[in-house]
Image: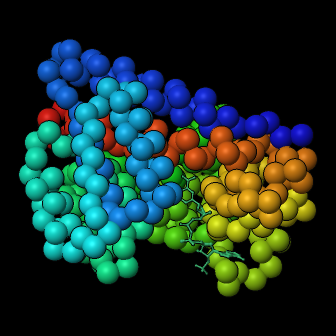
């Protein structure tokens, strides 16, 4: 039976570190840390994410600035706001909640955010810096996964690592981070042949597909570290992951649950990135 990796506990520890450092910066340097969160339209899931980010900011002692814009906001209006926030010294990090309404070009908006304030690490400059291993901050979900793997004590060096999914926000950066930690990395996607065979070779398996319970116990190597990034709904509408937890925990050595695994890490790493941005902008890092 696998050991459960407790994402709530690990994320609480990250937030505690951030809170302590934030308090110290304020006390010793008079520095306040600020995150601006921009939401456009009325997507209910986005609303929940933005509220959670606001709460996390309060918990670690950041100032949070929320900009809620109407669904019919034009691209120009949104770009104007991003430019204002780029110049606002109180704002260390800017997060534009995705997805944006379809009439707005997400790429144009991401490209407009100053790379120094791009705490999601989606800007091409930050993506490029991850490729060459010279990064200021890492995209929050893959960074959270790395922290969860570290919490197991398993050394990535020399391990066969398999990432299922090649999205720009999860799969690709995930693979780069595992590579930087000396893993031997395979990236799988919807056209991969013999997925089960590839997965069975994985000492570390990271699954980011978006299909409920897709990876089953018979695809997992005995003792593997299994990280489930998926946030899906099962046949009863209940939140679940991309991994069939019940069969997988019988084979894995370590496994993340859904909920309570990767999910809480993403916001914790966002707080960490915002603190890093603030320190860099103040010339402290
Ligand atoms: P995405 O952009 O839709 O990418 C999905 C990837 O999975 C694609 O690369 C796709 O391959 C691959 N895929 C789909 N079906 C497959 C199959 N049958 N076999 C192998 N690969 C397959 O998704 P994403 O944004 O990376 O998100 C993935 C999951 O993670 C979702 O459930 C999402 O909700 C969740 N997520 C969670 C967090 C968190 O904080 N916990 C954060 C971000 C995402 P192709 O490229 O060939 O199409």
Asked if residue 39 lies left or right of residue 151, the reply is left
Q: Quadrant of residue 283?
A: top left
On screen, residue 70 above or below 159? below
Q: Residue drawn at (48%, 31%), measured in percent from left and top?
A: 14
Horizontal and vertical percent position of residue 280 = 20, 40
On screen, residue 92 above or below 218? above
Horizontal and vertical percent position of residue 113 = 22, 61
Asked if residue 39 lies left or right of residue 208, the reply is left
Q: In this rendered view, identify the residue nearer to me: 241 or 64.
A: 64
Q: Residue drawn at (43%, 53%), measured in percent from left and top?
A: 47
Asked if residue 255 lies left or right of residue 181, the reply is right
Q: Residue drawn at (88%, 58%), measured in percent from left and top?
A: 217
Horizontal and vertical percent position of residue 102 = 37, 79
Q: Residue drawn at (36%, 54%), measured in percent from left and top?
A: 120
Q: Quadrant of ligand 1?
A: bottom right
Q: Quadrant of residue 198?
A: bottom right
Instruction: State which quarter of the image contains the C terminus.
Output: top left
């Amino acid at each position: 039976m696998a050991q459960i990796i407790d994402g709530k506990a690990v994320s609480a520890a990250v937030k505690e570190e951030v809170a302590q450092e934030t308090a110290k910066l304020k006390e010793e340097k008079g520095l306040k840390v600020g995150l601006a969160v921009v939401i456009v339209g009325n997507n209910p899931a986005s609303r929940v994410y933005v509220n959670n980010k606001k709460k996390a900011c309060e918990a670690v002692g950041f100032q949070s600035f929320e900009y809620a814009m109407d669904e019919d906001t034009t691209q120009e209006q949104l770009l104007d706001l991003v430019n204002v926030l780029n110049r606002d010294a109180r704002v260390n990090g800017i997060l534009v909640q995705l997805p944006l309404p379809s009439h707005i070009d997400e790429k144009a908006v991401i490209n407009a955010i100053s790379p120094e304030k791009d705490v999601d690490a989606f800007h091409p400059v930050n993506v490029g810096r991850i490729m060459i291993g010279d990064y200021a901050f890492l995209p929050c979900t893959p960074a959270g996964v790395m922290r969860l793997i570290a919490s197991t004590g398993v050394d990535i060096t020399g391990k066969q690592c398999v990432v299922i999914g090649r999205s720009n926000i999860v799969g690709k950066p995930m693979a780069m981070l595992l590579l930087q930690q000396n893993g031997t990395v395979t990236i799988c996607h919807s056209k991969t042949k013999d997925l089960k065979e590839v997965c069975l070779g994985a000492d570390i398996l990271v699954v980011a597909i978006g299909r409920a319970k897709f990876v089953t116990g018979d695809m997992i190597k005995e003792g593997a570290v299994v990280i489930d990034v998926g946030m899906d709904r099962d046949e009863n509408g209940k939140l679940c992951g991309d991994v069939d937890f019940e069969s997988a925990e019988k084979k894995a050595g370590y496994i993340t649950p859904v909920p309570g695994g990767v999910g809480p890490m993403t916001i914790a790493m966002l707080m960490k990135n915002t603190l890093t941005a603030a320190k860099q902008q103040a010339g402290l890092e």
